[in-house]
Amino acid sequence: MSTTPRKVIIIGSGPAGHTAGIYAARANLKPLMFEGMTKGGIPGGQLMITNEVENYPGFPTKITGPDLMKAFRDQSIHQGVEVVTEDVVKVDMSKRPFKVTASGLDGESDHYAETLIIATGAQAKWLGLPSEKALQNYGVSACAVCDGAFFKNQDVMVIGGGDTAMEESMYLSGICRSVTLVHRREEFRASKAMQDRVLKNPKVKVLYNTIIEEILDVSKQQVTGARVKNMKTNESTVVPITGFFVAIGHTPNTDLFTGALDLHDNGYIKVKPGTTQTSQVGVYACGDVQDFTFRQAVTAAGSGCMAALEAERWLAMNH
Ligand code: NDP
C-alpha cells in the first residue's frame, strides 16, 4: 500500500485498459493497472473467451483472443505499466486524490490516484443453458461482427428481440445463407425502423413466442442445430443451423461507479461526446463500459488511447 498518489490508475485490462496503459506509460505517467482476478470479469476482457479474431488490424490471417490479449499485456509491461492481478472492490471519488481499494490474495489495500481510467468493459448476457456454455467458441457466439465470417453461406440462428438482435440478424444476412431470428415474445422490443428492415429481409425468418430448449450437438463439439419450443403450441422442433448467436443484451461492469458517475439509463457510463471525459473531472472511461454501439476490440483500443491522452493533458494543465 502506498499513500503517495499515482498520476493514473487504470481499472480493467481489455484492449481499452492496455492501450490506455501503453500510452500513459510512454507519457511517463507510471500507470498502475488493476487487471482483475475473477470477480469483476476476466482479466483481458471478452477477448479471453473469443477463439479467433480476424478483424483486429495487423494480423493478416488470424489470432486467438487470448494470444492477442497476451500481446497487449506483454506490450503494456514492456512499456512500464505496473499490472496488478487484483480486483478493485471500491472507488472513492468524493475527494482528491481518488481512493481505489483493491482486493487480492493477501487481503485489501488502498491506493490513491490523481486521475482514473475506467476500462472495466461489459459482459454479454447468456441464456444460461449447459449446451450454450459447452459450445461457446464451437459455433455459439455473442458477437456477429466478430464471428459472422466463420459462417459464410451457412444457416445461423439469432436469439433476442432488441436492437442488437435486429442488427446482428441484418449483419449475418449479408454473409450467411439464412438467419432464423428467435424471440420469446409476440412483439419485438427493437425500434420500429430496425424491425422493419429485418422483417423485409427475405433471408431472415422469425420465430415468435419461441424459446431455446437445447443447442445441439454437445457430443460432437459443434453446433448442428437448435431444439426450439413454441410457447403457444408447446411444440418442440429442431432447426438445423451451424451458428448460434445470442443477442439478448450486455451488462456493463459499472457496479463500482453507481452513484459516483453519471450513467445512461442502460447502465453504461456517460462520457462527453467525442471524448472519454466522465461526469467527474479527472475520471475517464473507455472501451465497452461506455460504448453500447460499436463494442469492438479496435474501437475499445482507440478510446483507451484517447483516455490516456486526456488524462495526460489534464495532469499537465493542473500540476
Ligand atoms: P435489449 O435489452 O434492448 O433487448 C434484449 C432482448 O433480448 C429483448 O428482446 C429480450 O426479450 C431478449 N431477452 C433478454 N433475456 C432473454 C432470455 N433470457 N431469453 C430470451 N430472450 C431474452 O438489449 P439490446 O442489446 O438489444 O440493446 C441494448 C441497448 O442498446 C438498447 O437501448 C438498444 O436500443 C441499444 N442499441 C442500439 C443500436 C442502434 O441504435 N444501432 C444497436 C444495438 C443496441 P424481451 O423483449 O421479451 O424482454
Image (tube, rainbow, N blue to C red):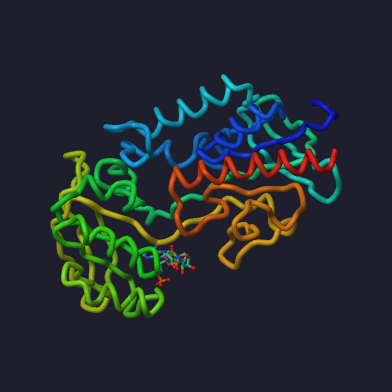
Image position of 254 with respect to 180: above or below: above
Question: At 79% across and 49% down in the image, what residue appears?
Answer: 93
Image position of 84 with respect to 15: above or below: above
Q: How many marks?
A: 0
Quarter of the picture containing the C terminus is top right
Quarter of the picture containing the N terminus is top right
Residue 108: where, in percent of width, then height? 74, 32
Image position of 246 with respect to 61: above or below: below
Work out whether residue 298 or residue 48 is closer to the camera in this orientation and state it. Answer: 298
Work out whether residue 216 or residue 92 is closer to the camera in this orientation and state it. Answer: 92
Considering every residue shown, the one lying at the far top of the view is 78
View quadrant of ligand 1 = bottom left
Residue 208: where, in percent of width, then height? 27, 75
Residue 48: where, in percent of width, then height? 43, 36
Work out whether residue 226 or residue 294 is closer to the camera in this orientation and state it. Answer: 294
Question: At 72% across and 48% down in the image, what residue appears?
Answer: 283
Question: Toward which corner of the image does residue 125 lie, by quadrant?
Answer: bottom left
Residue 168: where, in percent of width, then height? 32, 60
Question: At 22% across and 77% down in the image, what residue appears?
Answer: 200
Residue 162 relative to residue 311: left or right: left
